[in-house]
Image (cartoon, rainbow, N blue to C red):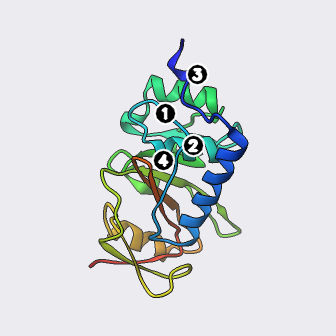
Amino acid sequence: MNDALLGGFVDAAVQSSHAFRAALTVLSQPGEIRELHGAVPPAPLSVAAGVLLLTLCDGTTPLHLAGAYDCASVRDWITFHCGAPLVSVEAAVFALGDWVALQPLGQFAIGLPDYPDRAVTLIVEMPALEAKGAVLRGPGIADAAYLSLPEVAAFQANRALFPLGFDCFFTCGAKVAALPRSTHVEAV
């Protein structure tokens, strides 16, 4: 049996509903870390990244794969389970890769003054994801939150573009966190 046919949701309606709720929670509460389950994607995709793709991507959401994530097993799995068109950086609504592979960030859409929603959402695969490190402040955070980010300067520059800029999901194993463009990031 083709491996691309395996690893999707067993009960798509329920599992995607739970995953969508978790994705909205982490996006609206920066620094919050949740776990996502229900998918068994091919390597090198993490469980959380696979679940996000199954939940957020379909035939109308162009996806760019960067670095090691742009491989036959991942492309075939996405094509079968999501139907998301795989595109170049410039056309991406979502982009998936590790932090190094997604560079330079300036290549991604940040929206337009009249349409700030026309920006990319990055799904960044991380080696670790913990509630420590950079200090986060802003909407959805009572006082301060903490998150292990790959760097600080890029997110400070992104915040300076607000209401333009990109949004990020961070994934590691089954864990997911998010950083919307509205969040202020400070080095520790």
Label 1 or label 2, whichever comes before in sequence order: 1
Helix, strand or loop under label 4:
helix
Give the residue furthest to the left. Answer: 188
Give the residue furthest to the top. Answer: 1
Query: Residue drawn at (54%, 30%), measured in percent from left and top?
Result: 7
Viewer-side residue, 162 vs 147: 147
What numbered label is drawn on residue 5?
3
Tell me the CA gap for discs 4 and 1: 9 Å
Give the labeled residue for mark 2.
53
Tell me the CA gap for discs 4 and 2: 9 Å
**Dot 4 and dot 1 residues touching (CB under 8 Å):** no
Helix, strand or loop under label 2:
helix
What amino acid is labelled 1 in the image? Pro
Q: Left or right: 86 with respect to 102?
A: right
1 or 2: mark nearer the eye: 1
What amino acid is labelled 2 in the image? Leu
Give the labeled residue for mark 1.
41
Tell me the CA gap for discs 1 and 3: 10 Å
- The answer to whether residue 185 is above or below residue 17 is below
Give the labeled residue for mark 4.
48
4 or 2: mark nearer the eye: 4
